[in-house]
Image: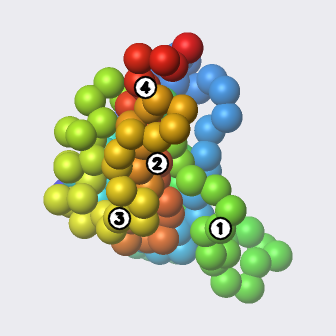
Amino acid sequence: MADDSVTTAASHPDPALMRGVISYLSLDGRAGEAADFFARAFGARDLGRYPDADHPGRLMHVQVEINGGCLMMTDCRAPWEAEAPTPQGFNLMLVVGDGEAWWSRAVNAGCTVVMPFERQFWGDRWGLLRDPFGFHWAIDEPGDSAP
């Protein structure tokens, strides 16, 4: 487990990770714990943890790479939020070549099954998991008929 009070990356991540839409999760004190869990469940690689100088023990910014993309997190809340918002209305999707391996690793790490990983009508193998922080993760393995 990484020390949440120490920056673990000295440089900027590869620009190729910083494209498209990047999710930024508010975890209200659990960003470091989430990054550690995502390493076990999804093979996340820690790109940096930046402490909140005004709030010891909390992280202003955490950044990980999962499956070639970037995910960002914070322990901070926006000034207009009375409490951390509950995750809703979205899932984080991982499109992978070996869905069974990704699925098994995530379940073994502590994710719970929302929808089983199985062949879908569009040809892919797909399933939905919930992590201990309340976020939903879709695992998609493209099928033969996928573009």
Q: What number is the disc on residue 113?
A: 3
- How far apart, in angstroms, are the residues tagged by discs 1 and 4? 25 Å
First-in-chain label (3 vs 1): 1
Give the residue at x 46% y 40%. 120
- From this view, report whether residue 115 is shown above or below residue 46: below
Q: Please give the residue where the numbered disc 4 appears in the rendered image.
A: 142
Q: Quadrant of the C terminus?
A: top right
Tell whether 52 sits left or right of 105.
right
Give the residue at x 51% y 19%. 146
First-in-chain label (1 vs 4): 1
- For the residues bearing labels 3 and 1, Cβ distance under 8 angstroms: no
First-in-chain label (1 vs 2): 1
- From this view, report whether residue 29 is shown above or below residue 39: below
- How far apart, in angstroms, are the residues tagged by discs 1 and 2? 14 Å
Disc 3 residue type?
Answer: Val
Q: Please give the residue where the numbered disc 1 appears in the rendered image.
A: 88
- For the residues bearing labels 2 and 4, Cβ distance under 8 angstroms: no
Q: Please give the residue where the numbered disc 2 appears in the rendered image.
A: 138
Q: Quadrant of residue 129?
A: bottom left
Q: Position of residue 59 (x, y in %)?
A: 48, 62
Q: For label 1, count other residues whose C-alpha is less than 10 Å away and answer few (under 14), some (14-19) or many (20+).
A: few
Q: How is the image coloured?
A: rainbow
Q: Position of residue 20 (x, y in %)?
A: 66, 27
Q: Position of residue 36 (x, y in %)?
A: 28, 56
Q: Nearer the viewer, mark 3 or mark 1?
A: 3
Disc 4 residue type?
Answer: Pro
Disc 1 residue type?
Answer: Gln
Residue at the extreme front of the image, as rendered: 121
